[in-house]
Image (spheres, coloured by chain):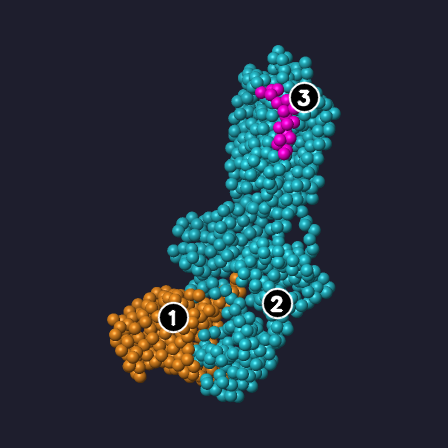
């Protein structure tokens, strides 16, 4: 059991980090005010752009796609380039391209749902969260509490105003992952409408 | 008088020496043994199987697992941890993700990852349809969702796929605690390594106290427990408390009755003295002989009280009723025969090959001899008071006997005996299952079952021992068996199987896997790089990593912190040209058992080992051996007794023999399967029954004999009839049998005596008149 737990403690965060980030905007931070502030935006959809920087190769891989957060219900993260892949989270679990993920570390979806529902305890359990700025321009830094995670994830930075705009993951080996969540009205009228229709 | 005092003095010195020796032994820590295995004989198995048994059960004996549910799990888990640590019972405790020291997964498995492909991936690669792998590779390069998914080191996420195929996804390590979902509830998983032996009663007590303290502080919390230490503690605790409550209850009962009969505390003290001296003598000899004493020996040994008090009762009853007319030499033949027959009945067990029974035999034999010597050497030196009350009671009992005696003649007795033999012989079933010696509470057994199911923690009781010339041969052999085992799992005949080969493929398989990986790279890697916008030059670097990949060696894996759990599955070298390892099996049904047994028969390098079945076999053998030895002893005793009693011998044998037949016939009719412990109790019935038969023939007209027999049976019924209400199966079986058996002894003793003319009975010792 010890071996399995140890392995799992690595692979669960690895598999789910990207998904957490996708889920954050609805209720982002431990500060209740910020969580409420972001929640007031309702459902949000739009495009995202991301860059993975590989330090040892000094090169980068770009990707882009669309995101949609349906509050307290569903998260869709659809990569469109360089390859199409849709990750979807709901209380049914995780689906990749419409199929349930077989090797799903059970509970990732649960965690996401906790985040969406504002159960911030789950996030601050794993991360030290420091928050700066105000509601119009905030910056949160998440550093892992567990040595297991910290040994390869340095920190996560999140910035935004009324909504989450940018996520940057800095890995311990110098690699980085930058994700920009573009505003709903920039190039995606459907998403824009969707977000305005939300209560 | 001087002549009788010297042996009495010597006996006193012997007892003092015994007392000093036992105290020293117990103070030095000779402890109460509750291990089932200590009772079993060496099963004459191969060394490999012994080593395999030890190795497989070690984790279960040295560690324990606790699942915890609480309103505030974090606080409760910390409190439990601190209670356990303060009690000094654990050397290592893990319940937070950080407690599982993160080892270098990448260092151990990373370099060999191109050689480690699970069945599913292997099938995909062999099918040649790898476009989906390319797509997934690209997606994970953009957004890594796994470990070390790097364009050069692992573009296809092989390491992650290997880990996913190996891991249980049940544990949740996201929070501060390691938790497990059971029936929709998150339970904290706490694993501990014991600071000492699971059999150490001191450690058991400290652990039990620590958990009790936690439960007291957190009444809302619920704990599930798994581990040998809990079973050992439970068994010792329950048996100890029952023996002491029931023992105390019966002691008080016996004392009250004796007080009523003799109305003299001094006389009662003289009745109990032989029990104490017998116990002191038996304990010292047993400790000296076996360096410890088993719980079951004590449980069984306490059954001797009934036989040991017989001698004192007969002597004191005779003295009380006869007063000055008492003559010791008239009592001696009966007392001597009583001792010889009882000791023979118990000591035959010493000839069985069971260490447990030998210990019981030694304890029983010494206890009886000790009590007898005290009765014969010490009691005549004491004074007894003749009371009219005692005489009146004896007279009333004698009237009762007069009404019962003579109702069962030899012909009717023979017919009844034949009927009983026919019923018992035809219908009596037996039960030798391990359940009999399980002293754990139902609660603990349920906890254990739940944890074993949820955590896949097997106790290593059923397994295949696989031998080969080297580790490569072993891994290859196991890989060749896997499809058959997987088939059994799919058909529902087998729960699961585990072996070292699950985590370390054979070199042959690793080489074939490496070739598959190479082909995948050749087919798809260019496309992946092109789509991701990465320079094509990376291809050579990636291919070099594959080419330089070393195989994962079993030794390397076992030495790593990741592989330490697999050490129990690997024996290594067993002689100069053989290695061996185990495939543990769980949830084996009859179909699977047959198939595995025939596999083991057809291959001299494979053995199927089922330890539960082995123990049951041993219990069954033990039961049959006791039955045979005691039957043999009974025949011998009958011949011996016939020398003295001639045609009256049947009256001597009838109470004991008839009572045993009554018990067996009743069990046959009620469908109670006979087990080992019923038989041990029948030995007590035999001992008391023979004493009764002998004394009634030695003193056929004496009120004191019948009074002593009645008192002896009542006191034994109080002591052992009460055990019938015990929740410990062993004690329950002993109690139930004793209850039926002794009641029968009393009745039969009365019924088989021949009728006497009214005027020829005497209230005193002039019984040969």
**Label 3 to label 2, Cα distance in Å?**
75 Å
Q: Which chain is orange?
A: A
Residue at image point 44% right, 50% down: B215
User: x%, y% of residue B587?
Assistant: 55, 56
User: In the depicted view, which residue is nearer to us: A177 or B725?
Assistant: B725
Q: Where is residue B542 in the image (x, y as percent from the top left)?
A: 55, 83
Residue marked by disc 2: B479
Q: Position of residue B68 (x, y in %)?
A: 45, 55
Name the side, left or right, on which A171 lies relative to B377. Answer: left
Residue segment shown in magenta: B404-422
Mark 1 lies on a secondary structure that is strand
Quadrant holding the C terminus of chain B: top right
Q: Which mark is residue B97?
A: none
Residue that badge 1 annotates = A89
Specify few, some or many for label 1: CA neighbours under 10 Å numbering under 14, 14-19, or 20 or more. many
User: Chain ID for label 3?
Assistant: B
B242 vs A159, left or right, is: right
* Subunit that carries the residue with mark 1: A
Marks 3 and 2 share the same chain: yes
Residue at 62%, 42% (x, y): give it: B293
Residue B652: in magenta span:
no
């Amino acid at each position: 059991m010890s071996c399995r737990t140890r392995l799992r403690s690595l692979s669960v965060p690895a598999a789910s980090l990207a998904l957490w980030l996708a889920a954050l905007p609805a209720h982002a931070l431990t500060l209740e005010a910020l969580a409420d502030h972001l929640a007031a935006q309702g459902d949000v959809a739009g495009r995202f752009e991301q860059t993975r920087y590989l330090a040892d190769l000094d090169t980068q891989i770009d990707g882009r796609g669309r995101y949609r957060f349906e509050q307290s219900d569903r998260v869709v993260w659809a990569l469109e380039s360089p390859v199409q892949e849709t990750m979807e989270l709901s209380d049914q679990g995780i689906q990749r391209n419409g199929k349930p993920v077989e090797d799903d570390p059970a509970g990732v979806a649960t965690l996401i749902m906790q985040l969406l529902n504002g159960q911030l305890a789950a996030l601050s359990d794993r991360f030290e969260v420091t928050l700066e700025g105000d509601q119009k321009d905030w910056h949160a830094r998440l550093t892992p509490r567990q040595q297991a995670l910290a040994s390869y994830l340095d920190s996560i930075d999140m910035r935004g105003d009324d909504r989450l705009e940018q996520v940057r993951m800095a890995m311990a080996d110098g690699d980085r992952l930058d994700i920009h969540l573009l505003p709903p009205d920039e190039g995606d009228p459907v998403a824009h409408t969707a977000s305005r229709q939300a209560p | 008088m001087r002549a009788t005092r010297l042996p009495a003095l010597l006996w006193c010195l012997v007892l003092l020496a015994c007392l000093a020796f036992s105290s020293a032994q117990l103070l030095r820590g000779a402890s109460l043994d509750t291990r089932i295995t200590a009772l079993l004989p060496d099963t004459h198995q191969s060394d490999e199987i012994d080593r395999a048994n030890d190795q497989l059960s070690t984790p279960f004996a040295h560690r324990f697992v606790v699942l915890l549910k609480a309103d505030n799990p974090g606080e409760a888990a910390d409190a439990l941890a601190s209670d356990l640590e303060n009690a000094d019972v654990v050397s290592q405790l893990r319940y937070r993700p950080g407690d599982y020291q993160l080892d270098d997964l990448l260092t151990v498995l990373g370099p060999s990852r191109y050689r480690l492909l699970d069945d599913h991936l292997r099938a995909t690669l062999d099918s040649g349809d790898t476009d989906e792998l390319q797509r997934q590779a690209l997606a994970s390069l953009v957004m890594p969702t796994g470990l070390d998914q790097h364009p050069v080191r692992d573009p296809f996420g092989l390491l992650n796929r290997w880990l996913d195929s190996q891991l249980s996804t049940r544990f949740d390590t996201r929070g501060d605690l390691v938790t497990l979902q059971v029936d929709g509830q998150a339970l904290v998983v706490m694993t501990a390594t014991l600071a000492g032996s699971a059999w150490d009663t001191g450690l058991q007590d400290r652990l039990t106290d620590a958990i009790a303290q936690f439960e007291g502080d957190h009444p809302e919390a619920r704990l599930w427990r798994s581990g040998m230490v809990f079973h050992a503690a439970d068994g010792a605790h329950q048996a100890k408390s029952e023996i002491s409550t029931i023992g105390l209850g019966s002691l008080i009962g016996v004392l009250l009755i004796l007080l009523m009969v003799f109305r003299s505390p001094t006389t009662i003290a003289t009745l109990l003295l032989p029990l104490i001296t017998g116990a002191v003598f038996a304990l010292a000899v047993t400790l000296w002989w076996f360096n410890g004493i088993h719980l079951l020996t004590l449980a069984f040994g306490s059954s001797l009280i009934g036989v040991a008090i017989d001698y004192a009762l007969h002597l004191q009853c005779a003295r009380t009723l006869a007063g000055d007319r008492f003559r010791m030499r008239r009592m001696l033949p009966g007392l001597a025969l009583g001792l010889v027959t009882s000791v023979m009945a118990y000591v035959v067990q010493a000839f069985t090959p069971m260490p447990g029974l030998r210990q019981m035999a030694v304890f029983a034999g010494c206890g009886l001899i000790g009590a007898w010597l005290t009765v014969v050497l010490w009691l005549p030196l004491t004074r007894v008071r003749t009371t009219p009350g005692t005489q009146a009671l004896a007279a009333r009992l004698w009237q009762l006997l007069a009404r019962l005696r003579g109702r069962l003649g030899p012909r009717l007795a023979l017919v009844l005996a034949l009927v009983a033999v026919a019923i018992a012989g035809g219908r009596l079933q037996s039960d030798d299952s391990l359940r009999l010696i399980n002293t754990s509470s139902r609660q603990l057994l349920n906890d254990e079952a739940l944890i074993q199911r949820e955590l896949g923690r097997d106790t290593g009781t059923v397994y295949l021992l696989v031998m080969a010339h080297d580790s490569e041969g072993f891994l290859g052999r196991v890989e060749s068996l896997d499809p058959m085992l997987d088939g059994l799992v799919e058909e529902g005949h087998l729960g699961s199987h585990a072996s070292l080969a699950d985590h370390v493929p054979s070199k042959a398989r690793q080489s074939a896997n490496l070739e598959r990986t190479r082909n995948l790279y050749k087919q798809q890697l260019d496309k992946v790089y092109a789509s991701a916008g990465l320079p094509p030059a990376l291809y050579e670097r990636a291919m070099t990593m594959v080419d330089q990949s070393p195989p994962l060696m079993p030794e390397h894996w076992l030495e790593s912190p990741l592989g330490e759990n697999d050490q129990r599955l690997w024996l290594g070298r067993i002689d100069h040209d053989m290695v061996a390892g185990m495939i543990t099996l769980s949830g084996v049904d009859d179909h699977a058992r047959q198939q595995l047994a025939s596999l083991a028969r057809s291959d001299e390098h494979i053995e199927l080992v089922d330890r539960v079945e082995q123990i049951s076999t041993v219990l069954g053998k033990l039961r049959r051996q006791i039955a045979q030895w005691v039957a043999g002893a009974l025949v011998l005793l009958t011949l011996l007794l016939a020398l003295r009693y001639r045609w009256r011998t049947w009256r001597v044998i009838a109470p004991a023999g008839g009572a045993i037949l009554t018990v067996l016939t009743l069990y046959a009719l009620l469908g109670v399967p006979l087990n080992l412990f019923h038989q041990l109790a029948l030995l007590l019935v035999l001992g008391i029954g023979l004493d009764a038969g002998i004394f009634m023939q030695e003193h056929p007209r004496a009120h004191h004999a019948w009074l002593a027999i009645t008192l002896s049976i009542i006191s034994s019924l109080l002591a052992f009839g009460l055990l019938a209400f015990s929740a410990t199966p062993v004690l329950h079986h002993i109690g139930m049998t004793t209850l039926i058996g002794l009641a029968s002894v009393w009745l039969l003793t009365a019924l088989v005596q021949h009728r006497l003319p009214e005027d020829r009975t005497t209230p005193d010792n002039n019984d040969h008149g």
